[in-house]
Image: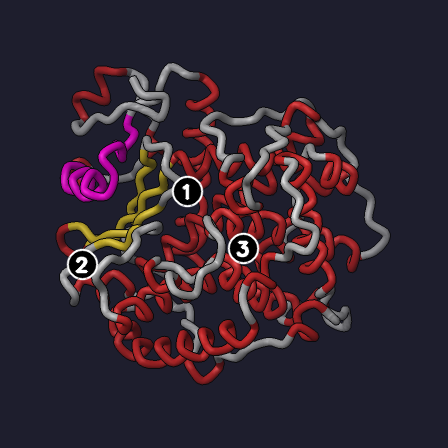
């Protein structure tokens, strides 16, 4: 049995095993084989998990992941007034991956790879116990988290080397609660991103081009420029959908981890919530920026560069703050966004020993290129928005093309 789970495609098989856990997937039996065939086409190791493996640590991670996925889907369906079912499955592959796809009868489904959730949690735990972040969170630093020094690697290669296939466990309640909070937001962002694809008509736009699924890390070999821009616009929309919900929700929700801290005012509490959320989003975007930025290869990947995604998601932090009733009269703390980048990069250096003193993720994008890219991205969004509206489900609004705008560094960072 793989450490990432065991597949099983019939109800009888699941009953015989005695280890089936209902939260690992909500796919009905009639759709399981079709879903599995689609996933195997994308990743030969992408077995849908129906049985928990014997490994206790992985079993706990899988159950928590299933519960979190079900909770996120239920919350979004309720808030967006979605009547149609949204199915999901956890996939027993170590890849950092996610997928949205259509099944028979235009049934919507998402898949989340366990590799993404386990590796993401391990990264969060390691970064938290570096001297840099441990000091800020007032927990104990743990030297054993470090894997450096890694000689001869740039900061992107070094960060990818931090992808460990097994969880890096917490030692005490303070650390565990912090990891749980950050990991929940990291996972919720990935899950919400996939849900956006199935709610906002993206799969139907792709189906018109003989496609039935959107794979997160797919690279294009022979696509036209127009198709590539369309893919980037869809991924941007999914990011914005996920970002506004994760950031806005965290600002409005009392977090269990807050019991470990004292706040002098509501403003301090809100700043803490924003800081935590942006740490999770930064780690996700850092994973998305897998290599050095190269303007010649940007359109070979389905997503915008991780640095661009981070910058655009930061605009959602600004929007969520100014729309929050409890933050009325409190200036947007843009310096927190800048600090998140700084402390995360210092923590990465703590773990890897690779130090690029002038590195700043947003600065890897030449300003003129970034401005031109955004104009083209938003223009493509204006082109496809009317067709997406035909297939969109839910009461929420997609971003109207005439409301898309670029925020300045002064607005974002308070500089």
What residue would you read off at disc 2? 211
**Chain-order first, disc 3 or disc 2:** 2
Report how far apart the C-alphas of labels 1 and 2 lie in the structure: 25 Å
> At 37% from the left edge and 14% from the top edge, which residue is drawn?
54
Above or below, 229 relative to 82: below
- The answer to if 124 sits in the magenta stretch is no
Task: Write down the region rendered in magenta.
Answer: 32-50
**Local crowd size for mark 3, using a 10 Å CA cut-off: few (<14), some (14–19), many (≥20):** many
Query: Residue 242: image x %, image y %?
Result: 47, 58
- The answer to if 34 sits in the magenta stretch is yes
What residue would you read off at disc 3? 246
Query: Residue 78: image x %, image y %?
Result: 42, 56
Disc 3 vs disc 1: Cβ atoms closer than 8 Å? no
What residue would you read off at disc 1? 69
> At 18% from the left edge and 29% from the top edge, which residue is drawn?
9
> At 82% from the left edge and 44% from the top edge, which residue is drawn?
262
Q: In the figure, is residue 268 to the left or right of 158?
A: right
Report how far apart the C-alphas of labels 3 and 1 lie in the structure: 14 Å
**Chain-order first, disc 3 or disc 1:** 1
Point out the image quarter for the N terminus.
top left
**Chain-order first, disc 1 or disc 2:** 1
- Residue 181's tag is none
**Local crowd size for mark 2, using a 10 Å CA cut-off: few (<14), some (14–19), many (≥20):** few
Query: Residue 29: image x %, image y %?
Result: 17, 35
């Amino acid at each position: 049995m793989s450490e990432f789970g065991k597949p099983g495609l019939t109800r009888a098989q699941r009953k015989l095993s005695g280890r089936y856990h209902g939260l690992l997937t909500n796919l009905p039996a009639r759709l399981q084989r079709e879903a599995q065939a689609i996933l195997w086409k994308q990743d030969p190791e992408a077995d849908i998990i129906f049985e928990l493996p014997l490994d206790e640590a992985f079993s706990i991670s899988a159950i928590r992941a299933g519960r979190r996925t079900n909770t996120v889907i239920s919350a979004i369906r309720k808030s967006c007034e979605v009547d149609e079912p949204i199915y999901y499955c956890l996939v027993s592959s170590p890849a950092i991956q996610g997928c949205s796809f259509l099944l028979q009868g235009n049934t919507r489904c998402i898949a989340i790879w366990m590799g993404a959730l386990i590796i993401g949690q391990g990264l969060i735990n390691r970064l938290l116990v570096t001297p840099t972040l441990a000091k800020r969170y007032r927990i104990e630093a743990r030297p054993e988290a470090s894997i450096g020094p890694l000689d001869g690697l740039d900061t992107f290669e070094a960060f990818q080397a931090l992808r460990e296939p097994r969880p890096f466990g917490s030692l005490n309640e303070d650390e565990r609660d912090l990891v749980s909070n950050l990991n929940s937001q990291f996972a919720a962002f990935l899950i919400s991103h996939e849900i956006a694809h199935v709610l906002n008509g993206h799969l139907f736009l792709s189906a018109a081009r003989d496609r039935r699924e959107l794979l997160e890390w797919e690279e294009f070999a022979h696509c036209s420029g127009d198709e590539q821009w369309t893919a980037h616009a869809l991924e941007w929309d999914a990011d914005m959908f996920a970002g506004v919900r994760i950031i806005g929700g965290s600002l409005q929700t009392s977090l269990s981890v807050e019991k470990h801290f004292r706040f002098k005012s509501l403003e301090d509490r809100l700043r803490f919530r924003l800081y935590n959320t942006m740490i999770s989003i930064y780690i996700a975007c850092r994973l998305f920026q897998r290599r050095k930025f190269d303007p010649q290869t940007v359109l070979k990947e389905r997503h915008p560069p991780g640095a661009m995604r981070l910058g655009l998601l930061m605009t959602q932090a600004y929007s969520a703050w100014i729309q929050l009733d409890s933050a009325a009269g409190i200036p947007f703390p843009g310096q927190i966004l800048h600090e998140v980048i700084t402390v995360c990069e210092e923590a990465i250096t703590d773990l890897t020993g690779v130090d690029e003193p002038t590195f700043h993720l947003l600065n890897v994008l030449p300003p003129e290129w970034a401005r031109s890219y955004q104009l083209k991205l938003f223009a493509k969004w204006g082109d496809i928005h009317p067709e997406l509206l035909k297939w969109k489900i839910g009461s929420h609004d997609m971003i109207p093309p005439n409301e898309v705008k670029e925020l300045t560094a002064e607005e974002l960072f308070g500089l």
